[in-house]
Amino acid sequence: MGLFDFLSDKGDKKPVAPNTTPADGTTDFFGNSNKDADTTAGETYTVVSGDSLSKIAKNHYGDASKWHQIYDANKAVVGSNPDLIEVGQILTLPKL
């Protein structure tokens, strides 16, 4: 449909219907659901002196072996070595 199609008087054309998707944050601009991102995001934790991923997992989840989930959610922050977390880093603790 071109610009001049709107200028012609053909009474059968109707305007595009507005998007009726709720604006409650359940979809992104393209209509994709981002509900999963909300449920897996969890809370944040700021690393303090003496912390390790296993200590954080033990305190938060009650199981030190769940440190892998914390690492997987924070690879961009932690880097390639999960043993080298730094004081002040803000980690996302995913919901399990």
Image (cartoon, helix red, strand yellow):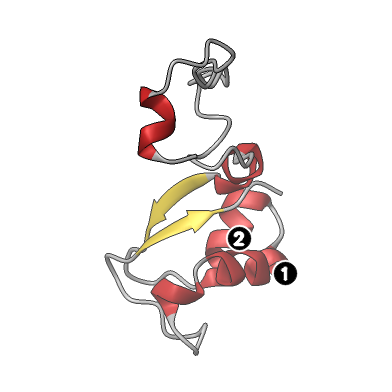
Given residues 12 and 63, the one toward you in this image is 12
Q: Position of residue 94 (x, y in %)?
A: 60, 52
| 87 sits to left or right of 65 | left
Does residue 54 appear in the picture of this structure? no
Q: Sequence-wise, which precedes: disc 2 or disc 1?
A: 2
The amino acid type of the residue labelled 2 equals: Ala
Residue 6 appears in which quarter of the rendering?
top left
Outermost residue on the top side: it is 11
- Circle on res. 18: none
Q: Say which amino acid is labelled 1.
A: Ser
Q: Residue at x 48, y 55 (%)?
A: 92
Label 2 to label 1, Cα distance in Å?
Answer: 7 Å
- Disc 2, disc 1: CB below 8 Å? yes
- Which element type, helix, strand or loop, lies under badge 2? helix
Residue at the spot of label 2:
57
- Which residue does the image show at 56% across and 64% down from the upper left? 73
Spot the residue most to the bottom: 81
The numbered mark at residue 65 is 1
In this rendered view, identify the residue nearer to me: 29 or 48: 29
In the figure, 85 relative to 74: above or below? below
Secondary element at image label 1: helix
Q: Residue visible at 70% across and 65% down?
A: 66
* In-front residue for pair 80/37: 37
Q: Give percent across and percent down for residue 14.
A: 54, 15
Local packing at callout 2 (Cα closer than 10 Å; few below 14, some 14-19, many 20+) is: many
